[in-house]
Image: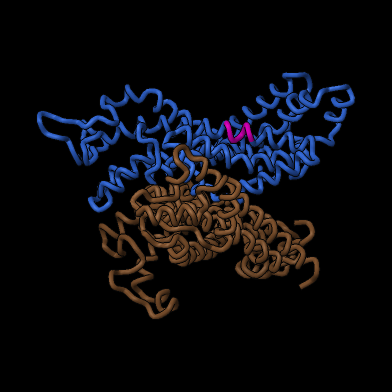
Amino acid sequence: MRSGSVGALPRPGQTWAGWRRAAGTLWGVLQHDRFAFAGIVIYALFVLIALSAPLLTPYDPQQTIISGDQLMANRPPSRAYPLGTTNVGRDIFAQLVYGARPALAVGFVAAFFVALIGTSIGIVAGYYGGWLDAVLMRLADVAFGIPYLPFVIVLVAFLGPSLWNIVLTMALLLWKDTARVVRAQVLTLRERGFVEAARVLGSSPRRLMLVHLAPNVLPIALLYGSLAVGWAILTEASVSFLGFGDPARISWGYMLQDAYISQALSGGAYNWFIPPGVCIMLVVMAGYFISRGYEELLFPRLRRR
Amino acid sequence: MTRSSTRWIAQRLAQMLLVLWVVATLLFLIFRLMPGNPLAAYIDPNFTADQQQALIHEFGLDLPLWQQYLIFLRASAAGSMGQSFFYHAPVAQLVWEALPNTLILVLGAVIIAFLIGATAGAFLAWKRGTALETAGISLALAVRAAPEFWVGMILLAVFSFSLRWFPTSGTASPGAQYASLWRQLTSPDFLRHLALPLVTLVLYLQGLPLLLMRSNMLDVMEEEFIVMARMKGLPERRILLRHAARNALLPVVTAFALVVGYSLQGYVVVENVFSWPGLGRLLVKAVAAKDYPLAQGAFLLIAALAIFMNLAADLFYTWLDPRVSYAKR
């Protein structure tokens, strides 16, 4: 990373001033970058859908709909069932809107922990250096060598299929990229005047890391965090598709698995398996869009394009 | 080969073995520290008492944990990974049978994805600022964001079930036998089976080389030797292909290792969509059937494959670009 790019970032001052200024800069990016703005709009839309799911559909996603004494199975899209029904008579639209809940929960919680763990390890390794740095970076090498999805599958199968076990295994492996980049950034920040000045004035290492270093690596943490949202949602969908998902929650991945094993493909039930994939794609793309905005903040050279 | 390069390769090999050892140890701990009887993880309750005794003895399951660990390491290093409950066959045999199928799929997809991605990236850089570029980039990004198993499902529904152009699963029609690997790879039946999983994986992998190539091209196009070539009045096509693309290509090749890593995430899922009998499908089946020895063996080989491919990619680009110094990496 070029140290010059840091110049665009706020300089820390008092305890909270650094954090406030960092937040201001990040907000500015969202306002000025069309792509980042589009990403935020997509997220907001899905959050809204997830929260207002009971208002959008009268059906429960697990409920088998019986009309008269007839099971409403394999219905094509109609006014009563906007996306039709599954082979056991569940409303696909209801599954789709309720499915936003586990997807967003996994995405945001996993991304938060990935960014938090990665940033903490990166700052500590970069600031202290020495043996601590060496140990932490070898740990990152090992995390890099472990095949990610197979590891999640094996661990989730042993720990039990729950949403939070999927989040846990993701946090265990995905911190490495954030940690490496944050560390590199801290290595250059450490040598700069304001950190030196704070040290001379007697700041404790903890205060140095929290007040002076952390706000300056916030954009990187957010960049990797917004990418991790997409990764986490994709991973949850993959794990559910392979049959190791949380059976108590209907997620988009579960819907796709359900469609796959219920012969929706040979039956040509596009109304069943197209919508969940589109939703996953949109949320992952929103993550890409937002990260693009932060990339431009971090690497101003890109701004021309 | 110089002395420093030999030393660098030896260092990388040592590092690779270290990571493999840590992964194997983690696996050992996960499998042994599971709740319940540790024997349950290794011994199929349907085995006869004699068979159970023999296996308990083979794995040293009646010994303390540290001795079990040594036995496990020795057996893994020797390539012996126990007996599969589900298939009633040695794990080593099952994973070695699945490996070629995975290799053909992954290597084929990575190479094709790079060829297509680099070409399309160069083309989009050339068309910079046009509606075509915007559309192309949006499409590449959308495909990259789509879950690969979902893309596979759509291809399967359209081209296999609806149009009936391609078979729906497996590597061969029933009864197919091949005299050699080459015969298999060139047989129309095998290629028809390979087509859809391969296309799915290529679509999943094309994004990175495409975006990288495009941004490198934009960089290179501003360099002085390109301006010079323009001033000399060379045709645009020649500048693009002979001067710009050549120089933009190298960083794309260095991303090879990264893409190989990504493909790992992809092939496990894609193999399951198309019932392609590779390592990913074997792992998922083993975990679903609680076939622990097989799950452990498949996972170890998947990890070894990823680490080895990373090393191979590293070696490949130090060979391509001698400026990448051995000492610094």
Where in the figure is residue A231, as x and y percent of width and height?
Answer: 51, 42
Residue B63 lies left or right of residue A276; in this view the side is: right
Q: Is residue B319 above or below residue B140?
A: below
Q: Residue furthest bottom?
A: B179
Residue B227 visible in the picture: yes
Residue farthest along the left direction in this orientation: A69
Q: Which chain is blue?
A: A
Seen at 70% across and 23% down, the residue is A19
* Residue B74 picture location, percent across and down: 59, 58
A283 above or below B207?
above
Front residue of this view, candidates B278 and B90: B90
The mark tally for this picture is 0
Q: Quadrant of residue B196?
A: bottom left
Q: Is B172 contained in the magenta span?
A: no
Q: Is residue B85 above or below residue A3?
A: below
Identify which residue, A305 or B62, lies in the foreground.
Answer: B62
Q: Which chain is brown?
A: B
Q: Is residue B106 left or right of residue A302?
A: left
Residues in magenta, as a range = A113-117
* Residue A76: image location, x then y, percent: 21, 41
Name which residue lies at 25% across and 53% down.
Answer: A266
